[in-house]
Image (cartoon, grey):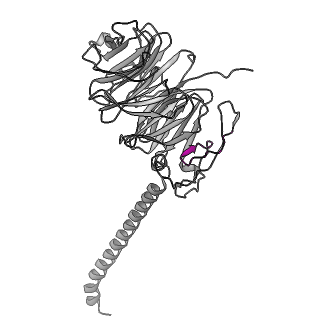
Amino acid sequence: GNPDQAKTQSPGKGKEAKESANSQKQAKLKQVEESEKAFLTHKKQYKLGEWPSIAFSTFFNCHDELVSVDFSNDGDLTAAGFDDSSITVWHQPASSDSGNKDLPDEAGVYAEKLVGHSGPVYSVSFNREGQSLLSSSADGYIRLWLYLPSSEKEKASTRWHNVFAFRPQRFSSPCPVWDVQFSPVGHYFASGSHDNACRIWDVEHSQPLRTCLKHLSDVDCVKWHPNCHYVASGSSDKTVRLWDIRDNKSCRLFCGHNDSVNSLVFDPSGRYLVSGGQDNIIQVWDIAAGKKINTLQGHSGPIWSLDVSADGKYLSSGSADGTIRLWNTEYIWSLGGNQDALELPQLNGSSMDGTHVSRRKQEHHNVINAPENVVPPADYTKPPTLNNKYSIVRTYRTKYTPVQVVRFHNERLLLAAGSFALPLMT
């Protein structure tokens, strides 16, 4: 009842109340942080919402003409080789509005036609920086194009210049060069051609540094190992070879395809090699062990392109059947050599035209069949297991567009392209 005593006690009570409020606020913040941490841990453990998105480029009115496509590493450049011997380069910055065709040239949007070859352009390849482009053709030449806008006037018309033409067959008649690929670093590149040879080049020399000769038929595709000491080549002789370019020796021979090998890719660690063939099958190889560890089935058409995300979590495959498949590599790699692996569910798929495709039950445990284009339900929270079809693969279907190229722009965005083809009327 003493006012003086109340006055002396009120500041203390106010301080305690303030401290209590701060304490409650800190507790709530801590609770939110723990909740967010738990969610991220749960998301990482169960891989919720981590499947990559796909940006697909469709070429119209050129189904019989589009032969090859490549994207630059930053995703701003697209190069396409055509049957009429021409190449077109599109520059579409990621920040620009792709739907606005009236953007000024200052916005960086352009399309330029490159003329120099005299036969179909079978392969195009950007270097790491996107300032150089290689192209190979049925005319037997590999051409090097550089981005050299030398003046403001020239920027409006010509940006890419053909600075050199490499000829693999110097003392014989030219033969088609099926594939050409820049190395991940430096100014080296590899080529595969109709004369059964895989060649290693330097852009500063007109003749190849290495000529690898052991294939029995055309070398259809080449791919650099991440450390740039090795090059893999796929051939029409149904084999894949790994070449040590330091001493020009074939250090690995992989046999398992039933037809030509169309595409190759290494995982980022360089331990595994994946090959896709004309036999509609993807094979996974352990380089150190020198053996096949997995067979991936599900496509109903030849495999035309393969790529692995930079974090190594996903393998993408593009096929003539008009589908893109994303494979969870955790199970592709882990099944290798595991004789006690669980038997995977045998699932049916359907082809591009809707006809049912049945597959006999596989006898070996390391054959993975891709399921239909299934999407996990909204409340799906089960951790992925070998018997969970959602964790193995996802299938993305186009209407009538064979997929010619798939390239990961980053860990969560896949770029792909193909030419629209009208269905045959029966």
Task: Work out which quarter of the rendered image holds the C terminus and state it.
Answer: top right
The x, y position of residue 2, in whole percent, is: 29, 92
Quadrant housing residue 30: bottom left
Q: Examine the rendering and report whether any part of residue 109 can be seen.
A: no
311 lies above or below 168: below
Q: Nearer the viewer, residue 117 or 1?
A: 117
Work out whether 173 lies above or below 342. above
- Residue 79 shows up from this direction: yes
Query: Viewed as shown, does residue 378 lie left or right of 333?
Result: right
Up-down: is 291 above or below 172? below
User: Is residue 65 rendered to the left or right of residue 422?
Assistant: left
In the rendered image, the vertical position of residue 202 relative to residue 15, given as above or below? above
Q: Is 50 a magenta residue? A: no
Q: Is residue 372 magenta?
A: yes
The outermost residue toward the bottom is: 1
Image quarter where the N terminus lies is bottom left
Front residue (pair 235, 371): 235
Residue range corresponding to the magenta coloring: 358-373
Q: Nearer the viewer, residue 55 or 408?
A: 408
| Percent of width and height locating residue 114 | 40, 12
The picture places residue 337, in percent across and down from the top left corner, at 46, 49
Picture quadrant where residue 22 is located:
bottom left
Q: Majority secondary structure of the magenta segment?
A: loop
x then y, percent, for residue 103: 43, 21
